[in-house]
């Protein structure tokens, strides 16, 4: 039964990490910065830091 919680937590971390990376690639923080903050802190806080970063002019 405990394995189900572990799987749910791992899926949560992976999915939020992927979302932060996708959004970070289009921002000044970049892909690496988004990943760094998401791993160092939590994926949700990394996502918030990424959203607060300015968007790049690249298309």
Image (cartoon, helix red, strand yellow):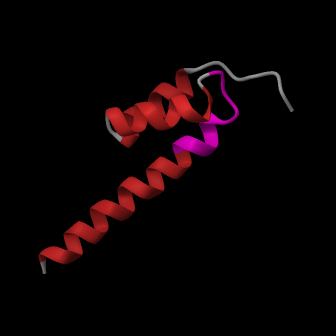
Horizontal relation, residue 4 to residue 22: left or right = left
Quarter of the image containing the N terminus? bottom left
Nearer to me, 30 or 20: 30
Residue 26, image x, y percentages: 70, 33
Horizontal relation, residue 13 to residue 24: left or right = left
Q: Residue furthest top?
A: 54
Which residue is depicted at the point 22% across and 76% down?
Answer: 4
Which residue is depicted at the point 52% across and 33% down?
Answer: 34
Please tell me whether residue 21 belongs to the stretch shown in magenta: yes
Nearer to me, 40 or 46: 40
Which residue is depicted at the point 53% across and 42% down?
Answer: 20
Residue 49, image x, y percentages: 47, 25
Q: Is residue 3 above or below residue 30?
A: below
Quarter of the image containing the C terminus? top right
Bounds of the magenta span?
A: 20-28
Q: How many marks?
A: 0
Picture quadrant where residue 2 is located = bottom left
């Amino acid at each position: 039964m405990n394995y189900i919680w572990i799987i749910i937590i791992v899926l949560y971390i992976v999915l939020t990490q992927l979302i932060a990376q996708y959004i970070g690639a289009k921002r000044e923080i970049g892909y690496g910065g988004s990943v760094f903050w998401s791993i160092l802190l939590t994926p949700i806080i990394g996502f918030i830091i990424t959203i607060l970063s300015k968007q790049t002019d690249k298309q």
